[in-house]
Image (cartoon, helix red, strand yellow):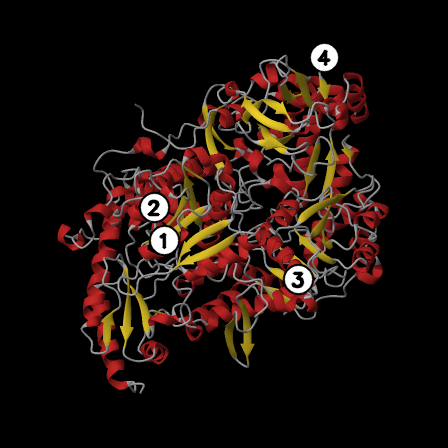
Amino acid sequence: MQADPSKVKTEPVIFQHSRPGRGAFGQWPAAMPEAALADIPAALRRQSAPCLPEVSELDVVRHFTRLSQLNFSIDTHFYPLGSCTMKYNPKACNQYAMLPEFTGRHPLAPESQGQGFLACMYELQEMLKEVTGMRGVSLNPMAGAHGEFAGVAMIRAYHRARGDLRRNEIIVPEAAHGTNPATATMCGCTVREVPVDAHGDVVLDELRKAVGPNTAGIMLTNPSTLGVFERRIEDVERIVRDAGGLLYYDGANLNAILGKVRPGDMGFDVMHMNLHKTFSTPHGGGGPGAGAVGVAERLLPFMPIPVVGRDGDNYRWLGEKDLPQSIGRLSAFAGNAGVLLRAYIYMRMLGREGMQRVGEYSTLNANYLFKRLQSIGFDAAYPDRRASHEFILTLRRQARDLGVTAMDVAKRLLDYGFHAPTTYFPLLVPECLLIEPTETESKEALDGFVDAMAAILQEAATDAEQLKGAPYTMPVRRLDDVRAAKHLDLTWKPAA
Amino acid sequence: MPFIPHTEAEVRDMLATIGVPAIDNLFDEIPRNLRCDGLPGIPEALNEQEIGRLMSERAARDGRPICLLGAGAYEHHIPSAVWAITTRGEFYSAYTPYQAEASQGTLQSIYEYQTMMASLTGLEVSNATLYDGASAVAEAALMAVRAHRRSRSLRILVARTVHPHYRKVAISTAGNQGLRFEELPFERGTGITDPAALKAYEGQDITALVIQQPNFFGALEDVDALTDWAHANNMLVIAVVNPTSLALLKPPGQWGAKGADIAVGEGQPLGVPLSSGGPYFGFMTSRMEYVRQMPGRIVGRTVDLNGHEGFTLTLQAREQHIRRGKATSNICTNQGLLMTAATIYMSLMGPQGLARVAAACHARSAELVDRLTAVKGVRLAFNRPRFHEAVLLLDRPVQPVLQALQSAGVLGGFDLATDYPELGAALLVCATETRTSADIELCAAAFANVLRQVKHAS
Amino acid sequence: MTQVPGDLRFTKTHEWVRQLDNGMVEIGISDHAQHALGDLVFVEVPEDGRELAVGDACAVVESVKAASDVYAPVAGTVVAGNPALAAAPELVNQDCYGAGWLMRLQPANKDYAASLLAPADYESVLAAEGG
């Protein structure tokens, strides 16, 4: 597979398209006379122009269109990134969320001028309660990590409200996503890790030793970050509860159980959902997400505000007065409202049956890939378990015997037209690939992926050196990230 | 099933490969008693035609009145190209750029964005966005605590003229880590931070001072004096700024003798629609010396194996996926798509276009204030230069006036009664470049009409 | 084969300690640690005059894949951080026991070596970790 010269990245930074005096004039308002600014004190005026490009509208369109063409995306590539749930983002969600009356509405506009929008928000809250088995939902947090923050803050607030000020320790399985311990620290808690056994389940004896009067709660993902269902969840729950702790559910893997199991029924007190995963709002090159939180009865008073309430036919915001024990406001306004509208539209298009199919078909696709990849020679990290909606392969054997790492395979997959699976996570499994196909991929997409993996395995055996230099056909080859961190070049500067 | 492509034959084949008779068998590890039996509370599916109809009906219910609301979210003209390109599938449905070779489009956009934001704020380095302006203030306070070596305190001084929601979010977010936010009052006559109030804090160990410019009232703070005072008293300066205003106003990097240390704010004015409050994006820039304390993703330029230029996420060792419990923040997903829109917007506007927008906002708001204060019962609250917002005092309670204006199709402004009861009947009004003189005439007439009719409170 | 010089003392967290002629101690990270981190891109050393207790997080060594805390193996006052590391963090990779020293301390107690590991004991620690 030789490099295609037309694909080599040649698009310069936009500042290099600048020409003095050029601009997208049709977008600018009329100039004001200088006198219009006379009342601004000279000492507060800007003296030199900021470094923004001077380019025509066509320059801008061409530049950013060309940049977009350098990306992989769900719209163009199969993207089996474990724990990210890269399912199809329906165009309808964007189209109807961006109706001008929705995009044009000011966040502080009165509720009476937002009943249409608030109806969507209220119904979204209700649907999320139904699929999670939780008693209350706040749509406020703006990402999964933000939702985690809200969840842990609520747990802490709950204990403090009961006068139990000692409970500041959050238990986290060692396989947990990095946001979990980072969140605990942000909430002023300490983190205590418990080990996970060779089958991917929390070691109950270690958990019993870890809990005590300082335990605020435990943060769990189920199915876990290892792609397997925590079979003794009820035991875990009992141990933590008996010690006085609460249970937090990280909803990153909700796609695996949507319509089949509800976290509320599993006994969790609080959870967050990643609407940009399970409910298909766009990943957007890094965001925006939405990390709605769900709570059981005992945490209802602490929900972050605002929450949408209903008096008869009238929808309104519930704020500080309605929820005096709330952990407070987490965003300037109502969170990522436009993202919430997209999630609402998606859930309405799936409906009752569609939502059940999500869990079923994401699990079907994962188990199919799981079987096929093992049959062509890859090792599963947990071969005795069912895959949930994702699974882990380990390339430990190939790394030892052939010197080929998971990262090498990931990079080579790019040449075959597939975005790599997740490689840096989970930390517990050496040389791992965490693979999540999602339910929106067809059988032939999965088969194509298996064919590519088979070819790569063959290359690893016959020409490992070639493999280690991948990718070859992308806009850039592998990048020097040591240099990037050592010689920081974080903003463009004109040549001296 | 919408979006699920499998045919029955394919399902049969796949089950045979896996070696189970039915999909249900794939869930056999899950205890039976935990399985749920369907989701009766979820309504039946709507096809695209039906959901389109429903959403259009709901949108029509909300309508589009003329809006004089600012207070942290501003209506600006958004060129068509911004969202036409931003919603291209290659930007919209791309993931976080962890695999740099497959994400050069996103990564280069971020690098260009970082360049523009750093320059706009007069500072040296920018991250790739935070959630919004409010959470950015919280993150800035936490960053200041990490970065300020010679201060051991967790005390942050915040001007009361900083957006009330931002102050609340700062407490909700950073309070759990022990940060204490102490408020500085404002002068009643000018609406800006009272310099006399600073004396009480001189010689104390305080980590940072947070100032908003223009402040929540639209008034222009004495940023040079405040910055110099803070530095003289061993505090870092956190500037909360409006990006449009920075085309005209002195940027934080130029405040006082040494410039502010960290600048944050709400990026929504740069090409992001109002959409009931989100998604927006928070921006954060700072001096280079603090870059390792900065939360969020950062993109750097480097070279590939062939020596060609390329872009990659850098300084990731600070972030949650590596540093875990000791990360600078737990932030993972950010507001990437909005950053893309803002970068396209700033490219279309350029320095001249943005300056024109800012000037038009200033002129239109001056016009609005002139026309409204000509109405009997309305006067200007503060005697102070301002930018694109102003506080008006009414001779009667604000709520009934706003309701009456709403019936006339005008959203008259933001009632300050909840957040600033000390001002009495006060209304925050805003006009951007999108308010034409005709709009302003209409609003003035509506005000005059309402104030003639609504009973004067005795 | 990881290097473990015979004239130094070690900790379980991979710091080494060298006694200097003037009574001060020099501290760094071991060959095992620098290898595990990979190419260092940044090193943060404590400021002069800082008082440290045993176990205090006193420095940070950052590579592309990790940013690790360095824990004070000895209680004392910081006399100097290695000034060469600002421009050349790679010295820690190239010569971790020599030019890549991190800091020098004036120890608070004369018997600080008692709680440190002898080279053979540190090698046992490494063997147990599978390094």
Of the residues tagged 1 and 4, which is closer to the observer? 1
Q: In whole angstroms, how far apart are the C-alphas of marks 1 and 4?
A: 57 Å
- First in sequence: mark 2 or mark 1? 1
**Which residue appears at 60% of the width and 23% of the height?**
C105
Residue B247, how many percent across, how many down? 27, 46
Q: In whole angstroms, how far apart are the C-alphas of marks 2 and 1?
A: 8 Å
Q: Nearer the viewer, residue B450 or A28?
A: B450
Q: For this view, does B424 lie left or right of residue A215?
A: left
The quadrant of the picture occupied by the C terminus of chain A is top left
Q: Secondary structure at mark 4?
A: loop
Residue B324, how many percent across, how many down? 63, 40
Q: Which residue is mark 2?
A: B229
Is there CB contact under 8 Å for labels 3 and 4? no
Q: For this view, does B385 lie left or right of residue B86?
A: left
Q: Which residue is mark 1?
A: B198
Disc 3 marks which amino acid?
Arg
Residue A382 appears anywhere in the view: yes
Is there CB contact under 8 Å for labels 3 and 1? no
Q: In whole angstroms, how far apart are the C-alphas of marks 3 and 4?
A: 53 Å
Within-10-Å neighbours for mark 3: few <14, some 14–19, many 20+: some
Q: Nearer the viewer, residue B292 or B352?
A: B292
Q: Are marks 3 and 4 on the same chain?
A: no
Disc 1 marks which amino acid?
Leu
Q: Quadrant of residue A195?
A: top right
Q: Secondary structure at mark 3?
A: helix
Is there CB contact under 8 Å for labels 2 and 1? yes
Disc 2 marks which amino acid?
Trp
Q: Which residue is mark 3?
A: A160
Image position of B2 with respect to A64: above or below = below
Q: Secondary structure at mark 1?
A: helix
